Each structure stands twice: as C-alpha cells, then as structure tokens.
Image (spheres, grey):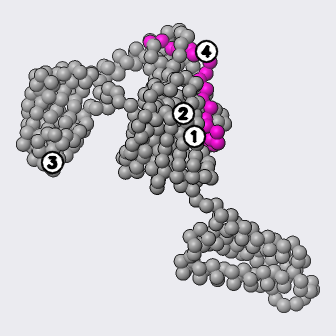
Amino acid sequence: MWVVGVGIGAAQMPDPALMHGRAIPAADLPPGTVTVRVVREALANNVVGQEVQLTADGTPRTAKTDDQGRATFTGVPGGVAGRARATVNGEELVSEPFTIPTSGGLRVILVAGLAELAKQKAADDAAAAARPPVKGTVVFSPNTRVLMEFRDDTLQVFYILEILNTTSAPVDIGGPLMLDLPSGAAGAATLEGSSPNASVSGDRVTVTGPFAPGTTSVQIAFRLLYDSSRVRVEQRWPAAMEQLTVALEKVGAVTMTSPQFSTVGEVNAESGTPFLLASGPAIPAGGTLAIELVNVPVHSPIPRYVALGIAGAIIGIGAWFALTTPVRSADSRRRLISRRDKLLSEVAGLEERRLRKGGLAAPEEARRQRILAELEHIYGELDETGTGPQGGGRDLAA
C-alpha cells in the first residue's frame, strides 16, 4: 500500500494491549533507573505489592510495586540488555527485550488480564452486533485525519477515517454513508484495514450500514493531478467530523491554509520526513473543508514534450521511409527495421534526459552520437534495399 506515514491522531486513552511490555525512554529519571508498572486490564487498575524481576546483563534483581503499581530499580548499568517479568495470579507477564540507556532511565508497563479482557470485549461486541439496529447518526471520530504527499506533479491523498457509533446497538443512518471525493480525484481505492462494507466507484466512497457500536475503519487513497503552484482542495463531509487533523508533506516553501485551521505547525514522521500539521475544531455534517496549498512543487512539462516530439519525428521519418520504398528483401528489411526501432527507443530516452537535465554525461552523449550515426547508416541501407533493382544489385546489409 502507499503508505502514507505520519502517526498523527487525537489524544486519547492508550490501549493497554499496545502498551504492554514496551519500554519507554524517560529522560526525567536518573541514569540507570528502570520503573516497572504492573496493572490489571486497564491503566488505572494498579497492582500493589507485586514482586517484579528485572534481569539486566544476566543479573536478576527483584522489587515490589508501590501504591502506584511501580517497582523501581536503580543503579542498573547502562548499555546492557534487560527484561522485566512478573507473575500475577498465575499469569506470567514478560516485557519485550530492551537496552538500558546510558542517560536517563526507562519506564516499562506490564498488563495482566489482557486475554480475559479480549474475550469479554469479543463477547460484548457480538452481543451488541446481534441487537436490532436503531435509527441514529454516526460521526467521524477525532482519530480521523487527512494526509497528503507529493509524487511527481501528483498530490497523493490518504483519508484515514474512523466512523464512530457511540451507542451500544447497531445504527441505521437511513442508507449508506456516501463520500464524494474532491474534484480531480483519480485512482481512488480502499486500503488494507478498511471495513469490508466500504467500496469505491469512480470518485465516490460508499460505506453500507448498519454501523456496529464503536468504530468502523475506512482508509482511502487517491491522486490529485495539478499543473500550478497553487492547489485548492475541497471536501464535503457527509457526517460531522469531531476534530480536524490534516498533514501535508513539507517540500520546499509549500504552505497550507484553511479557514477551518486553528493551528499549523511542523512535525517529523518516523522516517524523518517533515510534515505540516494542522488542526481545527469540529466540522458539522454537510460542512466543507477547504484547503489552499501554495508554492506546490511543479516540474515544467516542456522538456518532456520536446523529447517526445523529437522521438515522434524520428519515428515518423523512419515510418515514411518504410512505407514509401519497395521491399527488395523482406527478411533483411525486417532485421533492419527491428534494429532501427530499438535504437530509436534508446535515443528518445537519451534525448528526454538531455533536455530534462540540460545535458548528458560524456558517456551518454557519446552513446547518443553513435546511435545517431548507426541510424543514419540503417536508413541508408533501408533506402538502398527499397530502390535497388528487383533482380540483382549489391549485397544487402544483414
């Protein structure tokens, strides 16, 4: 999938399953300090008085959790491998391997009861899905966001949509939820992880209901072609958007503005790519998000058109010779024409690179000159094989 790659979302309570066993660097802790917090099912349920083992560089250490559910280890050597363990009511909890930092410390969290929690959630979801749907509405949750990246005079756009049903029963909104993409959208498709109820036809996204309690994930990718350094993107939302989040890859002096933005800043993706990150208040159902992009990178199409024109002219000349001269030896002509077409294709590519870059490297320029000389020779051979006497004459080129 295109990826799309900035981890940007609204603030919310972390999923304990995603936090379990992970070590998080903590610059505020003294060097050589590791805290291991033990909770049950939720981050607010601390397990007090629990024995925890920390093994670092093969040396085991033990400590008990305090009133906040934390076991604290100090004086751990920096740069060594470590792992934390605890056994809660017979359930063994083990962290992922980590390395003790040489500056600052680490915070680790171990979550008990995740398996039971998952079973209970699955049962609750199944029970909720089995209920008859009720009439109601859905919204786009605060985790909904718009991401934009540049790809060769194309704006690659990703909609990461979370359709939220806040009730405990499936919701019937009176039909499918239909989202018409901005004018000029092309190549729209759903991405991996989208609900099977989502489909794309042309520039329309359709999500059929009823919508289950919780969130329905829909991820859409499409392209917006442009030929100007100023691009306007307008998107009408069929349901209310609880919070606006938009990210744009920062290339050159590009800027992004909208009446709906309350803040615009700059962040880096995990890859280090800079993005402009904008946020704003809720947009009501039927509201339109209007974004103005300025100083968008544009590559002039003139070199491409010139190169293609030259290539077309060369091919046209060759075609004229081929069509206006009689054939003396079909087999010889086929070999010459095959060689000619191959060389024409190569010189067209070199010509395009020459015009695009303002010149060619010495080896490429030498190759171009050799190809043109060989083409001149081939056209001469084709001319001779087409106009010579039919019953004799000089030998044909192979």
Asked whether the residues under the numbered discs 2 and 1 touch, taking CB atoms below 8 Å apart as contact, a structural biologist would say yes
Residue for badge 2:
289
**Label 2 environment density (alpha carbons within 10 Å; few <14, some 14–19, many ≥20):** some
Depth-wise, is mark 3 or mark 1 nearer the camera?
1
At 9% across and 36% down in the image, what residue appears?
73
Secondary structure of the residue carrying numbered label 4: loop
Residue corresponding to mark 3:
103
For residue 174, which numbered disc appears in the image?
4
Sequence-first tag of 1 and 4: 4
How far, Cα to Cα, is label 4 from label 3? 58 Å
- Horizontal relation, residue 368 to residue 283: left or right: right
Numbered tag placed on residue 180 in the rendering: none
Q: Residues within 10 Å of mark 1 (few under 14, many from 20)?
A: some
Indicate the quadrant where residue 172 lies: top right
Q: Nearer the viewer, residue 241 or 269?
A: 241
Q: Nearer the viewer, residue 223 or 195?
A: 223
- How many marks are shown on the rendered structure? 4
Calculate the distance from the C-alpha at mark 3 to the C-alpha at mark 1: 46 Å
Q: Residue at x 25, y 24 (%)?
A: 43
Q: Which residue is mark 1?
A: 233
Q: CA distance from mark 1 to mark 4?
A: 29 Å
Q: Nearer the viewer, residue 352 or 338?
A: 352
Q: Secondary structure at mark 3?
A: loop
Q: Is residue 190 visible?
A: no
What type is the residue that disc 4 sits on? Answer: Gly
Instruction: Identify the magenta region.
Output: 168-187
Q: Position of residue 166 (x, y in %)?
A: 45, 16
Of mark 2 and mark 4, the one earlier in the sequence is 4
In 3D space, how far apart are the residues under numbered discs 3 and 2 (Cα atoms)? 45 Å
Mark nearer the N terminus (2 vs 1):
1
Mark 1 secondary-structure assignment: strand
